[in-house]
Image (tube, rainbow, N blue to C red):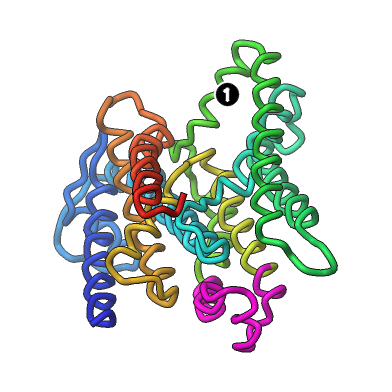
Amino acid sequence: MRGKATGLAFIILLGVLIFTVVLSSGLGAVEIAPLQVLSILASQFGLNIGVPFTEQQEAVFIALRLPRVLMGLFIGAGLAVSGAAMQGLFRNPLADPGLLGISSGASFFVGLAIIANISFAGIWTLPIAAFTGSVLAIILIYSLAQHDRKTNIATMLLAGIAINALCEAGTGLFTYLSTDEQLRTITFWQMGSLGGASWSSLGSAAPLISLSVLGMPFLASALNALLLGESNARHLGVSVEKVKWVIVALIGLGVGAGVAVAGRIGFVGLVIPHVIRLFVGSNHRAVLPLSAIAGALLLLWADLISRTIVSPAELPIGILTSMIGGPFFLYLLLQAKKKGRL
């Protein structure tokens, strides 16, 4: 029964995702009909499906819309898969990539780069700073959680909360010390946006996110075993310490690369895995791939709304995802409280 539900959910989500990619690619200041989107795509491979389009539509689609849509697809999938893996690792449906301080570490280094006027890599300075902050946060938290060559999950969680608080305080200090222009840059970066998507930024983030999204399903069996507890997982032959290290590294790659090019986009990793579990259960063989598709779907719709609801201006995408994720997080807390888990 679960297998049928998983297969049906996969087909439905994949169909809706393809429809959303075509729709999202066509809507905006320059409208491109769905058949024209397909025609432009086909023309890139030398095919002619008989649907005319203008040079302006082709230029907008290739240079602006397609990299933006693909960026949303990759980042949404990366955040959702990382959230699903974290919830499995911590055995807690309230776990989110933000808890490990990855996003906060990125914010801290971006704030530092802006306030110190560091620009050694031009337009890549802030993405490099963000990725450096994410990786350093992961390394620090993982080091703090080590004891007798074992990783204590509870300590990792508490260390993540502490690093989060420290980085947020540092970012707050940078914000206080910044000039008006620096304040604007820090604020917009923290709110998250896909507006800066380009083929070059996509090329820098997509391989790292792909490594995380495609690599995590290979750990699905180990995550299922960890749901039974670390001792039971060891009895089942799982190399618990190695698995923890690989999962945390993949989360760092997926979330860090996404934050580096699009800023902070919260709650995708919290909401999506939980919704998927409601339909297909807690088997990570189903949860991880379905979360990837649903996460991409959520971010594409959030981006579509953010750039059309106040057109020609653009609403930061992080605001929309937080408007969805905040109430949902409160719902999870109330449900956990009702069931006596809090």
Above or below, 79 against 50 in this view is above
Q: Quadrant of residue 242?
A: bottom right
Above or below, 179 against 26 in this view is above
Percent from the top left, x then y, of residue 212? 56, 65
Q: Quadrant of residue 181?
A: top right
Percent from the top left, x then y, of residue 274? 37, 58
Q: Is residue 229 magenta?
A: yes
Q: What range is drawn magenta here? A: 215-244
Above or below, 114 against 232 in this view is above
Q: Is residue 127 magenta?
A: no
Q: Which residue is mark 1?
A: 185
Percent from the top left, x then y, of residue 162? 69, 40
For the point 38% across and 42% down, the residue is 325
Q: Quadrant of the N terminus?
A: bottom left
Percent from the top left, x then y, of residue 276? 33, 63
Q: Quadrant of residue 154?
A: bottom right
The front one of 239 and 33 is 239
